[in-house]
C-alpha cells in the first residue's frame, strides 16, 4: 500500500467518525453512555473477529512476544477516549465535541517527541497548528464558556493521541492489524459492559430504541473506521495520520448540518478550507522535499 492510499484510508475513517458524532449524541436520548460503549464495541469485536482469523491463517511469521499485551494497552487508551467523549456529549454540542476532540492533532506530535524521541517532518508542526485553527474556525470562531463536557472532551483528545501514537508504534511491528483491532475492541467491550452493569440500568426496549445508532457506531465508527486507521497507520507516521484523522471534525460539522439541521457559518466554511490545506501540506510537502533531496544527491 502506498502512503497516498494509506492516507485515503485515514480520511475515510475520519468521515465515518464525523457521522458517528451524530449517532453518539442522539443515542443517549435512549441509552446510557456506558451501555452504548459496551454494546458498540461488542459489535465491533464481532466485525473484526473473522478478519483476525483469516489474518492468523495467512500469517507467515509468529506473533511477536508481548504483542497481545501491547494491543491491550492500545485498547485501554481507546476506552479512555471513548468514555470521556461519550460522557462529554451529555453536556456539550456535536460541534464543540468535534473541535475539542480534534485537538489530538496537536497532542500526537508532542507526545511523539516527548515519549518516543522521534522528530516528525518539519511540516507536521505548522500543519497541526493550521488544522487546529481550521477546526476552531469550523466551530464558528468562538467557543462558549467551557462546560464539564468540554473539559472531558479535551481529556478525550489526549487519550485519542495516546491511542494514535501506540498504534503507530505497534501496528507496523507486528503485521497483525486485524488482531490489534479485535483486541482493542474487546477491551472496550469488556470494560464498558462491566461498568455499565454496575452503574446503569438496561432493558430490551432501551436497546431497541438506540439500536440504529448502536449498529452504526459498532459496525462503521468502531469496526470499519478503526480498522482503516490501523491499516493506514502501517504505511504512514502517527503525526501525519493525526492530521488526516482530524478531518472527522469537518465531517462532524457537515453531517450535523445534514442530519441535525445545524448551521455552518461562512467562517466555518473557511475552516473547512483550512483543514483541507493542512491535509494537502502533509501529503505534498514531504514528497516534494524528498524529490528535491534525491535530485540534489544525484547531482552531487
Image: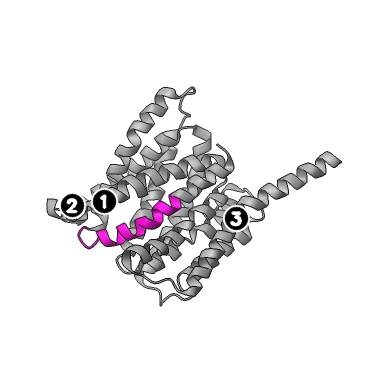
Residue 92 vs residue 268, the one in the foreground: 268
**Dot placed on the residue nearer the N-terminal end, 2 or 1:** 2
Residue ID at (41%, 28%): 55
Q: What stretch is highlighted in magenta?
A: 13-31
Q: Nearer the viewer, mark 3 or mark 1?
A: 3
Residue at image mark 1: 214
**In the displayed structure, would residue 201 be above or below residue 271?**
above
Q: Is residue 286 magenta?
A: no
Residue 295: percent from left, percent from top: 79, 43
- Could you give the CA–CA distance between mark 3 and mark 2, rounded to whole angstroms? 42 Å
- In the image, farthest residue toward the front: 258
Residue at image mark 3: 280
Kind of element beneath mark 2: helix
Question: Position of 21 compared to 274: left or right?
Answer: left
- Could you give the CA–CA distance between mark 2 and mark 1, rounded to whole angstroms? 8 Å
Residue at image mark 2: 207
Residue 68 seen in render: yes
**Dot placed on the residue nearer the N-terminal end, 3 or 1:** 1
**Dot placed on the residue nearer the N-terminal end, 3 or 2:** 2
Marks 2 & 1, CB-CB < 8 Å contact: yes
For label 1, count other residues whose C-alpha is less than 10 Å away and answer few (under 14), some (14-19) or many (20+): many
Q: Is the magenta stretch mostly helix, strand or loop?
A: helix
Residue 12 vs residue 104, the one in the foreground: 12
Amino acid at each position: 500500500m502506498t502512503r497516498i492510499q494509506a492516507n485515503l484510508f485515514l480520511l475515510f475513517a475520519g468521515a465515518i467518525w464525523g457521522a458517528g458524532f451524530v449517532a453518539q449524541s442522539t443515542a443517549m436520548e435512549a441509552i446510557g453512555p456506558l451501555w452504548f460503549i459496551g454494546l458498540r464495541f461488542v459489535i465491533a469485536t464481532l466485525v473484526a473477529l473473522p478478519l483476525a482469523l483469516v489474518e492468523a491463517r495467512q500469517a507467515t511469521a509468529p506473533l511477536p512476544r508481548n504483542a497481545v499485551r501491547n494491543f491491550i494497552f492500545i485498547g485501554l487508551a481507546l476506552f479512555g477516549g471513548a468514555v470521556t467523549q461519550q460522557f462529554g456529549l451529555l453536556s456539550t454540542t456535536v460541534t464543540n465535541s468535534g473541535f475539542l476532540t480534534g485537538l489530538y492533532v496537536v497532542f500526537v506530535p508532542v507526545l511523539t517527541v516527548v515519549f518516543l524521541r522521534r522528530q516528525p517532518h518539519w511540516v507536521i508542526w505548522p500543519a497541526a497548528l493550521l488544522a487546529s485553527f481550521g477546526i476552531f474556525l469550523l466551530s464558528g470562531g468562538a467557543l462558549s464558556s467551557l462546560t464539564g463536557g468540554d473539559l472531558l472532551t479535551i481529556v478525550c483528545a489526549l487519550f485519542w493521541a495516546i491511542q494514535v501514537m501506540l498504534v503507530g508504534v505497534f501496528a507496523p511491528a507486528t503485521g497483525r492489524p486485524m488482531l490489534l483491532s479485535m483486541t482493542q475492541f474487546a477491551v472496550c467491550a469488556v470494560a464498558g459492559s462491566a461498568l455499565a452493569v454496575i452503574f446503569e440500568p438496561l432493558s430490551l426496549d432501551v436497546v431497541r430504541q438506540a439500536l440504529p445508532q448502536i449498529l452504526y457506531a459498532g459496525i462503521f465508527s468502531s469496526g470499519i473506521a478503526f480498522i482503516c486507521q490501523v491499516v493506514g497507520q502501517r504505511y504512514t507516521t502517527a503525526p501525519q495520520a493525526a492530521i488526516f484523522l482530524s478531518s472527522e471534525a469537518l465531517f462532524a460539522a457537515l453531517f450535523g448540518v445534514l442530519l441535525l439541521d445545524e448551521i455552518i457559518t461562512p467562517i466555518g466554511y473557511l475552516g473547512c478550507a483550512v483543514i483541507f490545506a493542512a491535509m494537502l501540506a502533509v501529503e505534498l510537502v514531504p514528497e516534494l522535499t524528498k524529490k528535491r533531496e534525491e535530485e540534489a544527491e544525484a547531482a552531487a
